[in-house]
Image (cartoon, rainbow, N blue to C red):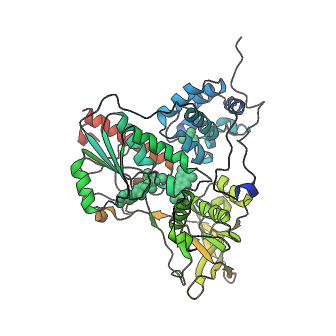
């Protein structure tokens, strides 16, 4: 009888790829997790129970066929595993690295619920696709025939790139416009290298170029450029993400040294590319030798604290107004930050900033969690008389992002937006009320995840392909 390759979760313990020691990884911006060796990947994949109703798959926004690629990996059939994996995910090696798996696929793995650790789905997904790259299985998505139609995509983040890939494969002329000098959106200039090394993103951009996708970079789309793009292409996809930083107005918030997270992270990522960055070289966005306080408890805040550690800050503290259990950021990243020496001041909120011209400290008020509010979340309340000042030479505000005013920026009063300023677009297709104009990713969802932007990009591309194939009338979208 053939040996059963799967269901090994009782005999084999969950084992993540090894993580570099904190003292070592603090010295650079390289990724912190190693790659599985082949035998380890097979072993870990073999822990999957191949359950009849795979909750991992239904909780993956891309509905990746996880049980199948785990089984193929466990039996050494990696090229087939890669083919199945890439059929539903445009960038599996990126998702394997940065999806919050604990909230998505792995968080719903049934063997976790039976007391065994989850299958390490993200790490196996990364392993499969990194191996595919090494073996030359990842090839440019060339179309089999060209169509006499083109799509203009505004925004080269994961949403725009995922749409570009599918549309190009289907034979459309695709031009991607972006205000930055490199494609990738937040994959390139937001997320630091220790989570996602930059060559992983750039090789994907190269592949798209090889497939014939055109990139028009350093192109900040305004009303005139939008009108030109709209006139030139048969369809337009808006994939501009959300970049307006939420702010706090309080005494001292205008002082030098109180900075926005996105500007700080962009400067650091540019340095990792070897660019000359005047505002970093002048010291403004360099944490070296400074006491740093980061305000916020989300993934952006985690990226800022860990960037400051690597830049050589003398101390890094993170202020968050709720407690650890109620923070929005990933627990895995918080633990990584703690290992690297970051101190978390839970239940602490800023009240103002001290200093004359340049910030010298943060006035902190201590909080407690009160009664749940209408949303069911416990509201933080101030503890009177417990204020103190936290010394700091660099304060980074990581309080979330909002959309820019796109109808105004693009001179399109008819572009429908919600009361939060996100673009109103149809579920699954991204179609807006403007003929031939679609919207996807964070500009529709608000600040979200890479995997959802990919999902939107793929769905929108499919809708456009169907429309051009005559399967869908515009009104039905
Ligand atoms: C610091 C940080 C860390 C994150 N970490 C994670 C993580 O670990 N895991 C995860 O899943 N998600 C993470 N996210 C969220 C994730 O990056 C986003 O949800 C995702 O990138 C959204 O993709 P998008 O394509 O919609 O937009 P973006 O990636 O934001 O790309 C939008 C692109 O549009 C361009 N653009 C905007 N306006 C214009 C204009 N007027 N003209 C021309 N171009 C324009 C921008 O330059 C940008 O390149 C993180 C976000 C941040 C800020
Ligand atoms: S794409 Fe993300 S959620 Fe889906 S299987 Fe991969 S890591 Fe899990």
Q: Is residue 171 left or right of residue 12?
A: left
Is residue 27 shown to the viewer in this render? yes
Q: Is residue 288 left or right of residue 164?
A: right
Determine whether 187 is above or below 306 in the image.
above
Determine whether 347 is above or below 39 in the image.
below
Q: What is the quadrant of the C terminus in the image?
A: top left
How many numbered marks are there?
A: 0
Determine whether 123 is above or below 291 in the image.
above
- Give the image quadrant in which the ligand numbered 2 is located: top right
Instruction: Name the quadrant containing residue 6.
Output: top right
Instruction: Name the quadrant containing residue 119.
Output: top right
Residue at 57% across / 71% down in the picture? 396
* Residue 382 in the image, given as x and y percentages of width and height: 63, 77
Is residue 412 shown to the viewer in this render? no
Residue at 66% across / 62% down in the picture? 310
Determine whether 208 is above or below 421 in the image.
above
Q: Is residue 80 left or right of residue 389?
A: left
């Amino acid at each position: 009888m053939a040996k059963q390759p799967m269901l090994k979760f009782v005999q084999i313990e969950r084992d993540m790829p090894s993580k570099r020691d904190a003292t070592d990884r603090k010295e650079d911006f390289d990724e912190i997790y190693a790659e599985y060796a082949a035998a380890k990947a097979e072993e870990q994949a073999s822990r999957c129970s191949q359950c009849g109703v795979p909750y991992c798959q239904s909780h993956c926004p891309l509905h990746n066929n996880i049980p199948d690629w785990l089984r193929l990996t466990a039996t050494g059939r990696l090229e087939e595993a890669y083919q199945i994996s890439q059929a539903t995910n445009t960038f599996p090696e990126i998702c394997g690295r940065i999806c919050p798996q604990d909230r998505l696929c792995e968080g719903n793995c049934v063997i976790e619920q039976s007391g065994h650790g989850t299958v390490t789905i993200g790490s196996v997904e990364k392993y499969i696709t990194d191996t595919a790259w090494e073996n030359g299985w990842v090839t440019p998505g060339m179309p089999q025939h060209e169509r006499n139609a083109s799509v203009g995509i505004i925004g080269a983040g994961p949403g725009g790139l995922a749409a570009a890939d599918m549309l190009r494969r289907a034979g459309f002329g695709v031009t991607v416009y972006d205000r930055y000098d490199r494609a990738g959106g937040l994959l390139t200039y937001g997320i630091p290298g220790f989570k996602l090394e930059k060559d992983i993103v750039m090789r994907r951009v190269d592949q798209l170029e090889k497939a014939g996708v055109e990139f028009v970079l350093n192109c900040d789309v305004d009303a005139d450029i939008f009108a030109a793009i709209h006139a030139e292409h048969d369809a337009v996809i808006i994939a501009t993400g959300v970049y307006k930083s939420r702010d706090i107005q309080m005494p001292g918030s205008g002082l030098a040294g109180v900075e926005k997270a996105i500007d700080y992270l962009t400067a650091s990522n540019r340095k990792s590319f070897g660019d000359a960055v005047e505002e970093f070289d002048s010291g403004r966005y360099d944490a070296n030798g400074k006491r740093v306080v980061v305000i916020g408890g989300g993934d952006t805040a985690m990226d800022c604290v860990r960037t400051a550690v690597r830049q050589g800050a003398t101390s890094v503290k993170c202020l968050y107004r709720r407690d650890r259990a109620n923070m929005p950021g990933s627990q895995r990243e918080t633990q990584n930050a703690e290992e690297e020496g970051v101190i978390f001041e839970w239940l602490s909120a800023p009240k103002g900033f001290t200093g004359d011209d340049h910030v010298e400290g943060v006035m902190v008020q201590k909080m407690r969690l009160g009664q749940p509010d209408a949303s069911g979340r416990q509201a933080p309340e101030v503890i009177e008389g417990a204020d103190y000042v936290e010394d700091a030479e660099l304060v980074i505000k990581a309080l979330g992002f909002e959309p820019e005013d796109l109808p105004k920026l693009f001179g399109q009063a008819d572009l429908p937006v919600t009361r939060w300023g996100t673009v109103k677009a149809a579920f699954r297709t991204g179609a807006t009320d403007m003929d031939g104009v679609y919207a996807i990713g964070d500009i529709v969802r608000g600040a979200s995840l890479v995997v959802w932007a990919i999902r939107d990009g793929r769905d929108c591309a499919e809708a456009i392909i169907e429309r051009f194939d005559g399967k869908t009338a515009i009104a039905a979208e």
